[in-house]
Amino acid sequence: MAPLRFATDRELAYKRVRALLAAEDGTELIEAESAAYLHALLSSGDQAEEDLELHFLERDPVVTFRLLARTPSPMQPFCVSRGCVNGNQAQRKRIQELRDSLGWRSDDASFDNEKFDGWVPIFMH
């Protein structure tokens, strides 16, 4: 997935995502030295623990992320829904839910119209 873009200043975006994650059941925040990095240990019910790392870029209102399962699960061999990309769909959904609940957008959102108006990913040919 593309990095995430926010519309506020970096410190406010950091505080909002930190508060949101702190309010989630099963989430443990691992303290960082600055507002440029956030590390959280996520777990929920039947899902295994995952490490979420967020890096806030200094000059741009952009957040890069990494969501890594501590015990990997097998992914689907293929996907048939529109806009689907191979990969762990549960982790992708978790990032999308975080993005949407914060009011952020994907950095590739400017290409949304282009993606489905006659453009077909190369692996679909």
Image (spheres, rainbow, N blue to C red):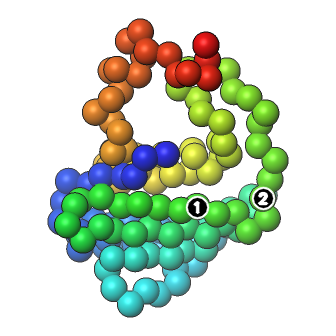
The residue depicted at 20 percent of the width and 53 percent of the height is 7
Tag shown at residue 21: none
Q: Describe residue 58's horizontal placement relative to residue 95 as left or right.
A: left
**Badge 2 amino acid:** Pro
Q: Position of residue 106 (x, y in %)?
A: 37, 44
Would residue 121 be seen by someone viewing this image from the given angle?
yes
* Quarter occupied by residue 70: bottom right
Which residue is denoted by mark 2 in the rendering? Answer: 72
* Quarter occupied by residue 116: top left
For residue 94, above or below residue 119: below
The tag earlier along the polypeptide, 2 or 1, is 1
The residue depicted at 28 percent of the width and 33 percent of the height is 110
Would residue 101 be seen by someone viewing this image from the given angle?
no
Q: Position of residue 19 (x, y in %)?
A: 39, 71
Tag 2, which secondary structure? loop
The residue depicted at 41 percent of the width and 60 percent of the height is 64
